[in-house]
Each structure stands twice: as structure tokens, then as C-alpha cells.
Amino acid sequence: MKLNQLFAAIGLCLLAIGSATAADIKPRLIRFGYGLVEQSNQGRATKVFADEVDKLSGGKMKIRAIGAAALGSDIQMQQALIGGAQEMMVGSTATLVGISKEMALWDTPFLFNNAKEADTILDGPIGEKVKAKLADNGMVGLVYWENGFRNLTNNKRPVAKLEDLDGVKLRVMQNTVFLDSFKTLGANAVPLPFSELFTALETKTVDGQENPYNTILSSKFYEVQKYLTVTNHVYSPWIVTVSKKYWDGLSKDEQNVLMEAAKKSRDFERKDTRDEAGKALAELKTKGMQINELTPAEAARMRDKLTRVNASIGAGVGMELWNETQAELARIRGA
Ligand code: TF8
């Protein structure tokens, strides 16, 4: 070992000892907002995050978790984070595209074939790159959670083929890719915040919506939706974010607490979500929903139509990022 390397090593040891004995952590109260109910995969993982922050900070940092969109819709909370009026949130990446256009990459229909591909890309260099762009726009992205593969529900008619979607008034997220995708399929797509969705379905302002099984269950959409079609048309991530204004005022130790707790919550959340999703379809059936599986031919027709939006996503997120993602997926699939 050269002398300068030795000094560097000693320095690192001293730093480690120093932070273990006198970590730079102040009493902090962090408001963490989310859109689903407490009894949901989102609510359960938020609890894990809060408990871990408490533990890692020796009880100094407290998370006040506020669910059911009580602090506002995803977009309203994002604005509060950017302005510094709220510290943290978790929400859909799809609602972030107005702030960070690269987020639209995750809206690509059929981008991932399975959860393992999603984890590999999201936690790898591409996911990092997309996440890092948020910092230019007032938010810091910590980790991606799983919202999941999305499926279609509606109250008008069973959807077994493309034409069945004709004229179905379908709520989509406030995101141009989703809007274009479902218009392409022939639906009458209406963007609405998630916080207004249940009422819109109940009052028949819209006929249908699309979300993972977990959410259809936890948000009780089965009470107001009769038909479910297994489409798995896109994988949606959630992202845990911090106000950049707030983050920049934290010490390194405090930032580490949030990052480590976020990683722990991510690992819990993905497992919990997948366990629940595995059982949710059967449960939705017992709740009275009528399930339609698409024939392979119909699934292929839908896929063909949906992937026509790919060119505009590539243009939107930048062809370099698009090509890099396709190359990485090809590499993973070949391996
Ligand atoms: C949607 C999303 C929602 C999320 C959640 C509120 O349909 O899938 O589940 O945004 O964080 O809006």
C-alpha cells in the first residue's frame, strides 16, 4: 500500500468510528404522503419505511405517514415537495413526466416481460439515470417500489377483443403516453387524478380504469366495476421521493438514514406486492368480478396497436436513453 492510500484508509476508519459514536442526526419530523389507503401495499411499505427510519436514527427522525391522498393527489404532492412545503412522498412515476420527461420511459407498453426484468433495469444504471434527472427539478428520487403490471376493469361490457373497448370511457393517469395508448385502442380516455377515481367510477363519470390487481383490491374498485380483463399492458413503478430543498439541508448521516430505510422498504414492498398480486385475482373473483383472459391472438392484436406509441416515447425521452434501454433488455434476455 502506498502512503497516500494508507492515509486514505485511516481517514475512512476514523470517519466510520466518528459516525458510529456521534452521528450527525437532529430531531426531524418528516411528512410522507401517499395516495392509496393505509391497508394497501403502499401503506404497508410506508410503515416499514417509517419504522426503519426511527430505528436507524435512534428515534430522532420521525416519519408522519399520511395516506389516502389526504395531502393531495400525486401531482399536488410533487409541487409541495418542489416548493419545500412537504418533505417526502411515494407515487407513480407516470405522474412525474411533466417534471422529468425521462420518466415516460416506464410508461412504455410491454417494456418488461416480468418483475425480474423490471428490478434489473430499475435498480441498474438506467433506472439510476432516470431517477437522477429529478434532482434538476426539485426532487430527489430514493428508490423504486412496485406498483405492478396493470390490468383493465370496466362496467360497460366484458372486454375480450379490441373492439369491445370502443367508446368505453376510461380513466387514465395524467400522462400523455397513457392517454395516447388508450386512444389508440379505441377507448375514450379521460385523464383524472387517482384521488378522484373511485367517485368517478361510482357516479359513472367514467366506465373503467386500469391498475394492478393489488390496487383494484385495496381501493375496492370491485364494488363499482364488474369486468376485469387480464391485459398486463404495462409495468408501473412507484418512486419514493424527497423534496430537494429539504434533502439539501440534511446531514450526510441523515441522508443515509433515509436512503437505507428506503432500500429496506423497497425490498419489503416488492415481495409483499408480489405475494398479494398472486392471490388477488382469485379474491377479486370471489368479490364478484367477471374475469376475461385474452386469447393469444387478441393479446397480440392489442400489443401490436399499443406498441405503436413507442416511437413517440423514444422521441420524448431521447433516443439515446431509449436505445440504451432496448440494448440492456436484449442483453438481459440473452443472458
Ligand atoms: C394511478 C396509479 C396510482 C398511484 C398511487 C396513488 O392509477 O397507479 O396507484 O399513483 O400512488 O393513478
Image: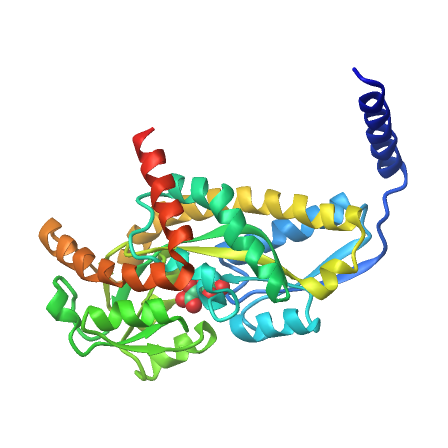
Image spot of residue 22 (x, y percent): 90, 41
Q: Nearer the viewer, residue 8 or 205?
A: 8
Chosen colour scheme: rainbow
Q: Residue at x 83, y 21 (%)?
A: 6
Residue sitting at the far top: 1
Q: Residue at x 16, y 54 (%)?
A: 299
Q: Quadrant of the N terminus?
A: top right
Image spot of residue 13 (x, y percent): 84, 28
Q: Nearer the viewer, residue 138 or 72?
A: 138
Q: Is residue 83 visible?
A: yes
Q: Residue at x 18, y 73 (%)?
A: 186
Q: Nearer the viewer, residue 235 or 327?
A: 327
Q: Is residue 218 visible?
A: no
227 relative position to 190: left or right = left
Ligand number 1: quarter of image:
bottom left
Q: Quadrant of the C terminus?
A: top left
Q: Is residue 275 above or below residue 31?
A: above
Image spot of residue 96 (x, y percent): 50, 66
Image spot of residue 214 (x, y percent): 40, 56
Please tell me how many numbered marks the rendered image carries: 0
Rendered image quadrant of residue 274: top left
Q: Residue at x 51, y 64 (%)?
A: 100
40 relative position to 311: left or right = right
